[in-house]
Image (spheres, helix red, strand yellow):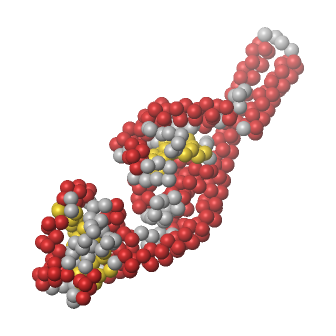
Amino acid sequence: MLLQLIGVSYKTAGIALREAMALDADAQTQFLIQARTIFPGSEWFILSTCNRSEYYWVLPEDNVAKISSDGADACESTNNLAVLHWLHQQVPLTATHAYQLTGLAVVRHFISVLCGLDSMVLGESQIVAQVKAAIDIASHAGSLGKCLHALLQQAQGAAKKIRKQTGIGDSATSVAYTAVLLARSIFSDFSPLHVLLIGAGDTAELTAWHLRQQGVTQMTILNRQAEKARAMAEKWQCQGSGLDALPDVLPHADIVISATSSQSPIISYAMLSDALAKRRRAVYLIDLAIPRDIEPTVADLTQVYLYNMDDLQQVVAEGLQAREQAAVAALPLIDAAIASFAAYQADLAATDSIVSLQTHAQLARESELNRARAMLARGEDMEAVLQQLTHRLSNKLLHHMLMLLKT
């Protein structure tokens, strides 16, 4: 059974195309059910995230490896062309932006995706939860068969081993992640803390995601454009407002992370001094903006801990280097996983061939036996009947075995 993949990712397509191809859980379920209906016996799996949309499929053995006078390759090509034609009708795939993989190349790609080697942020772990969610959707839709089950299990095991043995996800590679790790190093438990996130751009969005992953439950998002803050806050199920609310929110914030494009400071010495008078406990501020959002002089205030981009960039550089080294260390583990999957497919193919041969032999035996009995009933010579019986039976069995071996 031959694995097939077609898809687009952040490497090949812009955000507009990726948005057009993204499918939510309901849309994925409908697609998978429809695909199984149109191509009976096929297996399907969809991975749809903000950074990629990929379609994995396997055609049934009786279609893909059908033995005919034209050969298995021709049959396989015809069936896959039908799948590709149908896929192009369903989703906006283009030759310019789409990539297509076959066989063990699909295995290598999927393992690389799952362990973060193919991610925008090398080694990021968000993809693990996204793949698990996609597996649940495909399982409920009934679109997974023995081949895709084997791929998913092999890839999950390999990715887990790679992450554990290489530490590819241990080091910080973005300022947003680094900022959150810095806060985590200060606080062992985020759940009772109130985090103030200033900004609603890409950095703030990524920071919000990392904060949620680390267990932050109380978060307020402020932005110069209040509607953007409220839209982002709705996504993360927290409070959102305009910057005019900053003097009221600041006294309640234990951690402040600011990432705006403002050309002048948003938090001044005087503003923070007033906030400290109302809260009387330490506050940790992380300034991810250039120009800076927080006046550097606030560091002179007691119970104030201020970190800026210079403090974080070295950590980011060290983290990226560590992940790149881990990526190199992951390659032999991926090769081992591919070899294991190839061995599984070989065993599966041998088993299928044996079953096919046994079924064919039984049918040939019954057919020739019935033919010989009819000849004997007509009074034909027994020796001639036996000669024909053994000759025809051996020809049928040998022809089928030779075709299996050739395939």
- Residue 175, x across and y down, in percent: 39, 71
Compared to residue 283, the image places residue 47 above or below, namely above
The residue at the point 59 percent across, 55 percent down is 108
The N terminus - image quarter: top right
Q: Residue furthest right?
A: 383
- Res. 340 visible in picture: no
How many badges with numbers are in the image?
A: 0
Q: Please tell me which residue is depicted at 14% across the width and 67% down the height of the picture.
A: 245
Indicate the position of residue 14 as horizontal and vertical percent values: 43, 49
- Going by the image, does 335 lie left or right of 121? right
Identity of the residue furthest to the front in this view = 263
Question: What is the quadrant of residue 68 in the picture?
Answer: top right
Name the residue nearer the viewer: 250 or 224.
Answer: 224
- At which x and y percent is residue 294? 26, 76
Q: Residue at x 65, y 41 (%)?
A: 352
Q: Position of residue 38 (x, y in %)?
A: 48, 31
Does residue 30 appear anywhere in the picture? Answer: yes
Q: Residue at x 27, y 67 (%)?
A: 262
Name the image quarter holding the C terminus.
top right
Measured along the vertical axis of the image, is residue 184 above or below residue 330? below
Q: Is residue 382 left or right of residue 21?
A: right
Relative to the observer, which residue lies in front, 321 or 259? Answer: 259
| Closer to us: 41 or 372 | 41
Residue 64 in the image: above or below residue 224: above
